[in-house]
Image (cartoon, helix red, strand yellow):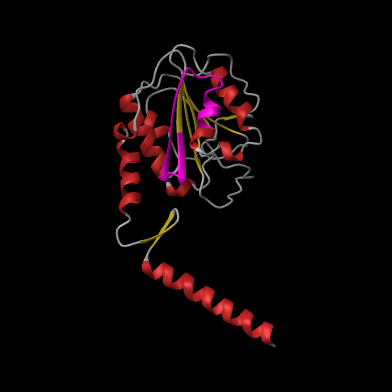
Amino acid sequence: MAQTLIADFVADLQKVVALPDPVVEFGSFITDPDSGVGDMRPLFAGRPFTGTDMRNGPGVDRIEDLRALSFADGEVGTALCLDTLEHCEDPPQACRELARVCSPDGGVAVISSVMLFGIHAYPNDYFRFTPEGFRALLAQGFDDVWVAGLGDPNIPMQVVGVGIRGSVLDLSLDRLPSLAAAQARYDAARGKVRIGPLHVSPRELARAVGRDLRRNAAQRIRFRA
């Protein structure tokens, strides 16, 4: 299920890269249907769109195993695999399958995943990826690849990637306004204190320090006793 930022990224991507039909989302299960977050169909209104996942539920039209897709070679125009690969037990095999089912004549895969993020079991959470990790995954079957990490370059919050078959991408962060704006907000971090890759408000920092001071004081008392 895609976050709002990732949905905005896909919307921007449509304006600069041809995303051909049919569109298939791999990992389309919507965990919170009432929120309206994660539904990619409105971005492709009036176009052939199939939502697939490993389990049935909201947003799912078809059950699929990313490691062994039932789609024929080259059957998919645009493959969306958004905030999903961390939940797959074999991401390299999943990306080989995405490349196989994407059309050799301009087929596109769009992938994303969180990196600096806690475990979120939907139903299981296995991996985290660096930008170069994404590049290696997509390079297995796509002719041109673009990747980016958002946040601190040494430990991004989010990683995105695009692969295309039979063509060349001309992508940069500047051509994708939603991602560029997110990076600019991180870099500015107005009113916040930077702690490594994290930005917290002074109030949040004071609370965290206060908790640690109380915990350390309690531990010293127990030790002396």
Q: Nearer the viewer, residue 34 or 111?
A: 111
Quadrant hosting residue 221: bottom right
Q: In the image, 102: left or right of 223?
A: left
As drawn, 193 above or below 141: below
- Is residue 128 or residue 94 the one in the foreground? 128
Q: Residue at x 43, y 19 (%)?
A: 21
Which of the image's four quarters has the C terminus? bottom right
Relative height, residue 211 to residue 39 (above, below) = below
Residue 200 lies in quadrant = bottom left
Report the label total. 0
Q: Position of residue 39 (x, y in %)?
A: 44, 38
Give coordinates of residue 175: x percent, y percent.
Answer: 30, 31
Residue at 31% across / 27% down in the picture? Answer: 15
What percent of the width, then of the height, locates residue 207? 45, 72
Q: Position of residue 209 (x, y in %)?
A: 48, 72
Q: Is residue 23 magenta?
A: no
Q: Which residues are magenta?
A: 134-160
Q: Nearer the viewer, residue 144 or 78?
A: 144
Compare residues 36 and 139 and report the one nearer the observer: 139
The answer to whether 105 is drawn above or below residue 19 in the figure is above
Q: Is residue 202 left or right of residue 110?
A: left
Q: For the point 52% across and 23% down, which residue is it?
A: 139
Q: Residue furthest bottom?
A: 225
Q: Is residue 21 above or below residue 58?
A: above
Q: Is residue 155 magenta?
A: yes
